[in-house]
Image (cartoon, coloured by chain):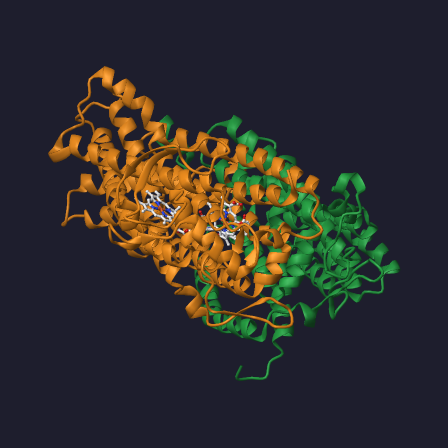
Chain colours: A orange, B green
Amino acid sequence: MDLELLTRLQFAVTTLYHYLFVPLSISLSLITALLQTASLVGRPPFGRVADRERWARLSLLTGKLLMATFAVGVVTGLVQEFQFGLSWSSFARFYGDVFGPTLAIEGMLAFFLEATFLGLWWFGRDRLPRLLHLATIWVVAVGTTISAFVILAANSFMQNPVAYTVDETTGRARLGSFADLLTNPLNLAAFPHTLAGSLMAGGALVMAIGVWHLVRGAHPADSEEFAAFRALSRLGAWVTLVSGAATAATGDALGKVITQVQPMKMAAAEALYSSTTSAPFSIFAYAPPGSDRPTFSVEVPGLLSFLAKGSFTARVSGLQDLQDAYAAQFGPGDYTPWIPAAFWSFRLMIGVGMLAALVALVHLWLTRSGRPLAVDSKVASSVLWSVPVLPLLPMAANSFGWIFTETGRQPWLVFGLFKTADGVSPGLSAPEVVVSLVAFTVVYGALAWAWTALVLRLVRQGLPPLPAARPAGDPTDDAAARSADVAITY
Amino acid sequence: MPFDLDLPVLWFAVAVLAWVLFFVLEGFDFGVGFLAPLLGRTDAERGAVVRTVGPVWDGNEVWLVAAVGVTFAAFPDWYAALLSGLYLPMVAILLLLAARGVAIEFRGKQDSPRWHARCDAVLATSSVLLAAGWGAVLGVLVSGLAMAADGEVHSAGVLGGLGRSLEPLGQPGAVLGAVAGPLLAAVQGATFLGLRTSGVLRVRARRVAVAGAAAAAVGTAVAVVTSTQPVVALAAGLLAVAAVAAWTRHEALAFTASSLAVAAAVAGVFTAHLPVLLPTTLPGGADVALRTAAASEHVLQLISVAGVVVLPGVVAYQVFSYWVFRRRVASPRAVPAARPAPGAAAVSR
Ligand code: HDD
Ligand code: HEM
Ligand code: HEM
C-alpha cells in the first residue's frame, strides 16, 4: 500500500476510535445531569423520598459509566491532537493558522472546564452544597458540547472553507474572522446533527442496560431494582427516540447544505451518474465489479431530489457533469470520491441509526402506562441476546456518518484548496506508518477490551447503593488506610 | 494590540510555561506511578499510593493538551517539524499515555485484587517508560534534529525507513535525558508521597527521596563540569537542597525543590538555542526559529484576546477546585466496613 493510503488509514482508525467514546461522553454527561436534577426535584416536599433515591442511585451508575468513558475519550483525543504534526505536517503548516488557534481555544475554553469540573463532581459529592454539586455536572455537559461545536468548526472548514485568505508568498491559509469560522453555515448544520447523533448513543446505552436488567429475570417485578431499571430503560428510550427524530430532521437540513457546498459528495452518496430531475433514492444497488453503473437497484422515485433540494422534481447534478466541471475549474485530475464507500456509509448511517430509534419506540410502546415489560422466558432469552447490540447501533451510525463525510470529500483535504496527497508529512516512510498503525490497533484494542470489561461489570453489579454519610470521627487507624488520605473520595 | 507587545516572544513564553507545568505536574505523577509497586507491599498500600494522584492526573495531563495546542497555534512550523521528525517516539509516548491514563482511572472502579494488579503493572511500566521517553525527547530538543531545508527530517533508508525517527534517540543528549527522566520523576514522586502519605509508606518514600535526590544531585553536578549552561548548576543546587530537605524531614521543601529543579531543567532545554527553537543537525538544513515559525500576527492577537478573556476563569475554577479539596489530607476516611453488599464493594466514590 502506498504511503498516502496508509496514512489515511491510520488517521481513520484513530479518529473513528476517538469518536466511539466522544458521543457517549457527551450524552452520558447530559443523562447524568438529568438524573441528578430529577433526584433533587424529587425531594420532599416535591416528591417521594423513594423516587429521589432512585434517581440518585441511577445517576451514580451513569456517572461511573461516564467516568470510564471520559478517560478513554481524553487519552484518544490527545492522540488526535498530535496526529496533524505526526503524519500530516504539510497540512499542519498549510492549515495551522486556522486549526491551531481553534484547537488552542477549545483547550482553554472546554477541556480545562471538563477535566476540572468532572473532578469536582466526582470527588466533591459530599463536599459541595447540593445545588453547586448539581451545577458541576451541568458544566461538564455544557463543556463537552462546546468541545464538539469548536472542533466541528475546524472540520467544517475542511468541508467548506470560509473566513480565510491564502497568503501570496507562503501559499498558506490565513485565518480571517474567528466568529465567521465558528458560524460556518456548514457547521451550523453539522453541529445539531452531530449532537443529536451523540445523544442517540448514550440513550441507547442506558436503555440497553435497563432492558437487560428487566428481562434477565433477576429482579422480581415489585422490587425497587425492577422499578428503577424500568425507569432507566424508558428514559434511555425517550432520549433515543427524540434525538433520533432530531437526527433525521437535522440530517435532512445538513444534506441540503452539503448539496450546495459539495454536490459531488451527495452525487456519490447516491451513485448518481448523470444529472437528473426527479432523482430517485435507491435503498439498495448492485454494480458488478469493473462497471461504473448499478445493474440492479431498489429505488424510491424522486426521494433524492427531495433530500437534496426539498422538491421531488428538482434537478440533481450527476457525477459525470461535476467531474467535468471540476476538471475545468481545478485542472485535469480525478475529482470523484470512492463511490461504494460514500454510497454504503450513507445508507448504513441512516439505516442502522433509525433502527435504534425504532427499537426505542417499540420499547416505549411495550412498557406504556406502567406495563412492566412482561416477557415469557422464550422471548426473554432472545431479547437478552440482542440487548448488547443495541448500544452499538448508534455508535456504528456515527462512524458511518463520519466515513461518509470524510471519504466523500476526497480527493480534497480542504475542499477546493488543498489535496489530501499534499498533506502527508514529506519525510515520513511507509514502514513507520505501518508500525504505528499496528501499535495503535493493538493498544486501542486493549483499551476497548478494558473499557468493555469494566462497563459490563458495572452493569452487572446493578443499582449502586447510595453512599453512606461520612462518619464524623474515624476510629480505625491502620497505616495504609490512613495514608490513603483520599480513600474516601475514590 | 493596545500595548505594543512582542507577540511571538510572549507566546513563546506561554508555550514554555505550559510545557514546564506539564513536566513538573506529570513528573510527580509518573514517579508515583512507578513507585507504587516499589513502596506498596500489599494491594491496599499500592492502592493508597495510586490514589494520591487519582484526582489530579487528568488535570495535569490537560497541560499537555494546552502545551501542544499553544505550540500548534503559535508556532505551527515548530509543531510540524518536531512531531513528524520524532514520529515513532511520539507515537510510543502517546500509546503509553493512553494505557497509563486508563490504568489509573479504571483501577479504583473494581474491587478485585487481580484487576488492581493488572492496572498496577500497566501503570508502573508505562510511567517509567514515559519518564524515560519524555527525557529523551527533551534531550533531542537540545541536540537538534536532522531537518532538511524544507524543515522536515527525511528518511535515509536506515532500518527500511524506521531509522528516520528512531535515530535521534541514539544521540548522547537523548540517552542522558532517558536516564535523567526516571530519576527526576522518582525524586519528585517520592517527595510528593512524603507529603501525601503517612505511616510506613511515608517512611519508605522518604528513603527513596533521599537516595534519589542525592544521586540526581551528584549526577547533575558532574554534568556541570561539562556544560556551560547556568541552569545545570541551578538544577544541581536545587536537587542538593531536595536531598537535604528530605533527609531532615522538610517534606514540603523537598518536594518544592525537586519540582523547581525539573522546572529549571525543562525551561533550560526549551531556551537553550534561542532565538532558534529547534536546531538542525544537517549541514545546509533549516533551523526552526522563533520569528519564522510564528503564526500570523492576527492569530497571535486572537489567541491573546481569548487567553485574556478565558484564562482568568480557568485559574479561578482550578483554584476553586483545589480549595474544595484542600481538607483532603486532614479529612477522616470512610470506614471500609461501611461499604455495603459485595456487589457494591466496587462503588468507588
Ligand atoms: C446516530 C447517528 C446518525 C444518524 C441516525 C444519522 N446521522 Fe447523518 N451523520 C452522523 C450521524 C448520524 C454524524 C456522525 O454525526 C455525521 C458525520 C459528520 C457530521 O457532521 O455528522 C453525519 C453526517 C451526515 C451527512 C454529511 C455531512 C457532511 O458531509 O459534512 C449528511 C448529509 C447526513 N449525515 C444526513 C443524514 C440523514 C438524512 C439522516 C436521516 C435519518 C441521518 N444523517 C442519520
Ligand atoms: C473535527 C475534526 C476533524 C478533523 C480536523 C479531521 C481531519 C481529517 C484529516 C486530516 C484526515 C486525513 C486526510 C483524509 O483522508 O482526508 C481525515 C480523514 C478521515 N477522518 Fe476526519 N477529521 C475530523 C473528524 C473526524 C471524525 C470525528 C471522524 C470519525 C469518527 C473522522 C473520520 C475520518 C475518516 C474515516 C477519514 C479517512 C477518510 C479517507 O481517507 O478517505 N474524522 N480527517
Ligand atoms: C480530529 C480532530 C480532533 C482532535 C484533535 C481532538 C482532540 C481532543 C483532545 C486533545 C481531547 C482530550 C481533552 C482533555 O484532555 O480533556 C478530546 C476529547 C474530546 N473530544 Fe476530541 N478531538 C477531535 C475530534 C473530535 C470531534 C469531532 C468531537 C465531537 C464532535 C470531539 C469531541 C470531544 C469531546 C466531547 C471530548 C471530551 C470528552 C471525551 O473525552 O470523551 N472531538 N479531543
Q: Residue furthest right?
A: B225
Residue at 28%, 53% (x, y): give it. Answer: A314
| Residue B212 horizontal/vertical position (percent) | 73, 47
> Percent x, y for residue A191?
37, 55
Mark yes or no: residue A119 visible. Answer: no
Left or right: residue B98 compared with residue A140: right
Counting the numbered discs, the total is 0
Q: Residue at x 38, y 42 (%)?
A: A346
Return the x and y of residue A96 as percentages of the image width and height. Answer: 58, 62
With respect to residue A56, does B259 lie above or below? Answer: below
Q: Residue at x 46, y 66 (%)?
A: A162
Residue closest to the eye, B141 or B259:
B141
Residue B48 seen anywhere in this rendered image of the structure: yes
The image quadrant where one finds the C terminus of chain A is top left
- Camera-nearest residue between B295 and B101: B295
Task: From the top left corner, tell me how far across and down residue A17 is, in percent.
Answer: 49, 41
- The image quarter containing residue B342 is top left
- Residue at the top extreme of this rendering: A378
Classify the position of the N terminus of chain A by image quarter: top right
Depth order, front residue of B11/B280: B280
Image position of A117 (left or right of A245): right
* Residue A257 sits above or below residue B95 on the image: below
- Give above or below for A245 relative to B42: below
Q: Quadrant of residue A239?
A: top left
In this rendering, the answer to whether A448 lies above or below A472 is: above
